[in-house]
């Protein structure tokens, strides 16, 4: 129990550093007992990653977060649906077909085969899509951002080459906290 409290408090501190605009509503993510805490934290991290990303063009009134994977992740991401990033609403799209990723600005995959993940992220790299994974190492996933377990902490890696290829600009605030890979 102490280990879980330590992990949660460490992640909370990291999230405060990530974004000074964390809304009070987002804090309810940590108070929800029915949803896996790890994915709740990753959902809020993902929301903040998107806040610290600049897309090459933006004519939509919303930012679409697409997710594919296990049920714990799906439930956690529902908690950030309808939040705001600048003047845009966050919409959540649960995808099951590979072709659906073209309509995403953020893509988080979990609980599917590595070969399928690499295929989807490889395709997404040619489009302005912020890709996020949770592989053992970013080189195995092909994503722009990758969550990793570092002892008792959840950290994240960023592949700058993939972000440039997708035409995305990541904030220096985000880069300072990441493990950079090229």
Image (spheres, helix red, strand yellow):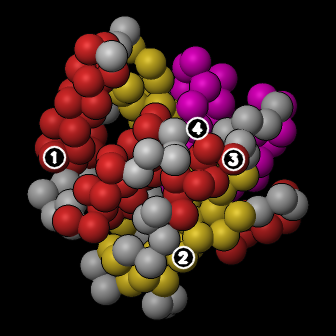
> Is label 1 or label 3 in front?
3
How far across and down, in percent of the image, does residue 14 sit? 21, 36
User: Which badge, 4 or 3, is on the more N-terminal residue?
Assistant: 3
Cβ atoms at labels 1 and 4 below 8 Å apart: no
Relative vertical location of residue 162 with respect to residue 58 in this rendering, above or below: above
Q: Which residue is mark 4?
A: 133
Q: Which residue is mark 3?
A: 71
162 within the magenta span: no
Q: Tell me what residue is drawn at x 36 percent, y 54 percent.
A: 29
Q: Tell me what residue is drawn at x 64 percent, y 35 percent.
A: 142
Of the 4 image quadrants, the one containing the N terminus is top left
User: Which badge, 4 or 2, is on the more N-terminal residue?
Assistant: 2
Q: Which residue is mark 2?
A: 91
How far across and down, in percent of the image, does residue 118 sit? 75, 36
Q: Describe residue 38's horizontal placement relative to residue 53 as left or right.
A: right
The one nearer the camera, 39 or 21, is 39
> Is label 3 or label 2 in front?
3
Neighbour tally class for label 4: few under 14, some 14-19, many 20 plus, Cα within 10 Å: many
Question: Which region of the structure is painted magenta?
Answer: 114-142
User: Which badge, 1 or 3, is on the more N-terminal residue?
Assistant: 1
Between marks 4 and 3, how big is the CA–CA gap?
A: 16 Å
Q: Describe residue 164's horizontal placement relative to residue 24 as left or right.
A: right
Between marks 4 and 2, how big is the CA–CA gap?
A: 19 Å
> Is label 1 or label 4 in front?
1
């Amino acid at each position: 129990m102490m280990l879980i409290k330590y992990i949660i408090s460490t992640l909370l501190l990291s999230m405060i550093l990530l974004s000074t605009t964390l809304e009070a509503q987002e804090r309810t993510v940590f108070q929800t007992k029915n949803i896996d805490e790890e994915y709740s934290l990753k959902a809020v991290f993902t929301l903040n990653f998107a806040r610290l990303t600049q897309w090459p063009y933006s004519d939509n009134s919303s930012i679409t977060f697409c997710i594919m994977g296990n049920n714990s992740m799906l439930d956690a991401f529902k908690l950030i649906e309808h939040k705001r990033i600048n003047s845009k609403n966050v919409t959540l799209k649960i995808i099951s077909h590979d072709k659906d990723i073209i309509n995403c600005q953020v893509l988080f995959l979990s609980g599917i085969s590595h070969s399928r993940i690499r295929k989807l992220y490889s395709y997404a790299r040619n489009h302005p899509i912020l890709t996020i994974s949770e592989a053992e190492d970013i080189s195995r996933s092909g994503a722009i951002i990758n969550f990793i377990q570092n002892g008792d902490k959840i950290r994240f890696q960023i592949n700058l080459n993939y972000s440039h290829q997708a035409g995305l600009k990541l904030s220096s605030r985000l880069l300072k906290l990441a493990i950079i890979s090229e």
